[in-house]
Image (spheres, rainbow, N blue to C red):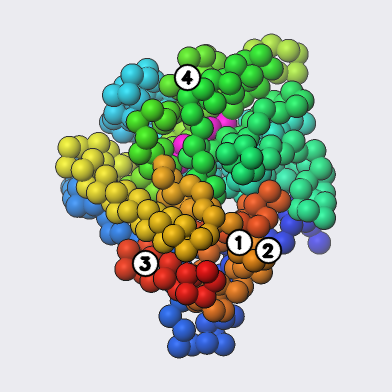
């Protein structure tokens, strides 16, 4: 038998969402008549925007003619999309990003999971708790941690607790590290870092020679105009940060697949001899070796969200989801539950009632209200005692789910 990567066996209890799927599946086969409402996994439900659909159709038609056929595209993305990103996502907000600093990909899960590959095997890490599980798990797989302890925390990671007392924002590491993962607006808590908060991080990273890995998958859901959408709105971030963005939640692309990474040219890492090396050059090398680019119709579809019509259409979808978040927050708090988030992010972070732990409340919610949430403990030990409710649903269903939660648990 071939030797396997032993680090995989350190991974605790499998990925969160398959476990939820298993429990929901078991409940449904035992209760085939139950009308289960899923506010668990963060997946969009609204159909593609008209501009996106048209752009994809047009791109397919173009490729079906000899004159417009495209084979392999540039690994890091077509210029038309990188230029649209630089201009609209950044330039329009006063942030200067060169199209050559942008790498288009098929998803932020892959990007935020793969980025660790270009850093040393013994690079040190700080990761918020709770947070999107991909950051921790991919570093476990790469062998940067020891085994998991009883609370699910891996030896060797510096966890940054995000608790009610800190407004669910991580505090600065107490020891220097090479890499810090940040996710704002946060999945799962819905907390968003202010400008002052990010300035603190940039200053810390620069003083400690660390790189911030900034996941901004939910930046479009920010409603407060004073909150930063990008780490690059903070002066000095170009020397210490990488940003991840995705069209998945922004434009309903979870099934289409398109995202991008921004790595400024100033960003340097250190090799074994202590010499400075461009981080973008390593990511470029990795991308051109392991990736053959996102399909042309998908990149044209992504470009379409920057047109005037496209922008309005995707904003209408975001508004729809944020109205759901408001329904969840208002309904639950009126009934006496403690909730956080849901204002600048499509997630509501709910304190479990009656002292139940996250999985106990998950099971009770499923059994009594036939509603699926996501147990907070699945995002890290500091998520224990919370449940994440997603605003990605049809509003009638969201309203009904809230009514059932109130009916059974208030
Ligand atoms: C959904 C999500 C992503 C996006 O992943 P894709 O692979 O682009 O679909 C990235 N980061 C976080 C925190 C997410 O919740």
- In space, the residues marked 1 and 2 are separated at their CA atoms by 7 Å
Labels 4, 3: front one = 3
Q: Could you tell me residue 270's position as x and y percent?
A: 68, 17
Query: Mark 4 — residue?
Result: 234
Q: In this view of the protein, which residue sits in the foreground, 73 or 229?
A: 229
Query: Mark 1 — residue?
Result: 352
At mark 2, the secondary structure is helix
Q: Are marks 1 and 2 in contact (CB under 8 Å)?
A: yes
Q: Ligand 1 within 8 A of label 3's CB?
A: no
Q: Which mark is residue 374?
A: none
Is residue 66 at least partly visible in the picture? no
Q: Which residues are magenta?
A: 213-217
Query: Mark 2 — residue?
Result: 355
Labels 3, 2: front one = 2
Q: Main secondary structure of the magenta part?
A: strand
- In space, the residues marked 1 and 4 are separated at their CA atoms by 36 Å
- In space, the residues marked 4 and 2 are separated at their CA atoms by 40 Å
Classify 10 Å Cα crowding around label 2: few (below 14), some (14-19), many (20 and above). few
Classify 10 Å Cα crowding around label 3: few (below 14), some (14-19), many (20 and above). some
- In space, the residues marked 3 and 1 are separated at their CA atoms by 19 Å
Query: What residue appears at the point 45 percent right and 88 percent down from the top-left corner?
Result: 33
Magenta residue check for 215: yes
Q: Ligand 1 within 8 A of label 1's CB?
A: no
At mark 4, the secondary structure is loop
Q: Up-down: is 136 above or below 364?
A: above
At mark 3, the secondary structure is helix
Identify the mark nearer the N-term, 3 or 2. Answer: 2
Query: What residue appears at the point 32 percent right and 68 percent down from the top-left corner?
Result: 396
Q: Could you tell me residue 35's position as x and y percent?
A: 43, 80
Q: Quadrant of residue 43?
A: bottom left
């Amino acid at each position: 038998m071939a030797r396997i990567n032993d680090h995989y066996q350190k991974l605790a209890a499998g990925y969160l969402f398959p476990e939820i799927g298993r429990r929901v599946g078991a409940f449904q086969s035992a209760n085939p008549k139950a009308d289960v409402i899923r506010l668990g996994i963060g997946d969009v439900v609204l159909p593609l925007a008209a501009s996106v659909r048209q752009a994809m159709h047009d791109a397919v038609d173009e490729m079906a003619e000899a004159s417009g056929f495209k084979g392999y595209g540039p690994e890091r993305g077509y210029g038309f999309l990188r230029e649209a990103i630089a201009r609209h996502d950044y330039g329009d907000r006063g942030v200067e990003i060169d199209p050559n600093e942008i790498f288009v990909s098929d998803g932020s899960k892959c990007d935020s999971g793969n980025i660790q590959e270009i850093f040393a095997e013994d690079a040190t890490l700080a990761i918020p708790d709770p947070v999107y599980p991909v950051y921790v798990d991919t570093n476990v797989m790469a062998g940067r941690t020891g085994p998991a302890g009883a609370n699910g925390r891996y030896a060797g990671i510096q966890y940054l607790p995000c608790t009610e007392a800190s407004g669910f924002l991580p505090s600065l590491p107490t020891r220097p590290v090479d890499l810090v993962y940040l996710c704002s607006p946060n999945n799962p808590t819905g907390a968003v870092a202010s400008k002052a908060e990010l300035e603190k991080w940039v200053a810390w990273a620069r003083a400690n020679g660390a790189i911030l890995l900034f996941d901004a998958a939910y930046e479009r859901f920010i409603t407060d105009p004073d909150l930063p959408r990008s780490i690059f709105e903070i002066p000095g971030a170009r020397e210490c940060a990488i940003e991840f963005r995705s069209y998945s939640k922004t434009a309903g692309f979870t099934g289409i697949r398109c995202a991008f990474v921004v790595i400024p040219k100033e960003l340097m890492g250190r090799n074994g001899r202590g010499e400075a090396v461009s981080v973008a050059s390593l990511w470029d090398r990795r991308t051109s070796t392991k990736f053959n680019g996102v399909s042309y119709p998908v990149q044209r579809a992504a470009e379409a969200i920057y047109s005037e019509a496209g922008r309005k259409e995707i904003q209408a979808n975001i508004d729809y989801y944020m109205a759901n978040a408001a329904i969840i927050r208002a309904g639950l708090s009126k009934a006496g539950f403690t909730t956080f988030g849901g204002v600048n992010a499509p997630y509501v972070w709910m304190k479990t009632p009656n002292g139940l732990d996250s999985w106990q409340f998950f099971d009770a919610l499923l059994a009594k209200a036939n509603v699926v949430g996501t147990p907070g403990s699945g995002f890290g030990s500091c998520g224990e005692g919370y449940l994440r409710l997603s605003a990605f649903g049809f509003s009638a269903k969201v309203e009904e789910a809230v009514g059932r939660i109130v009916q059974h648990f208030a």
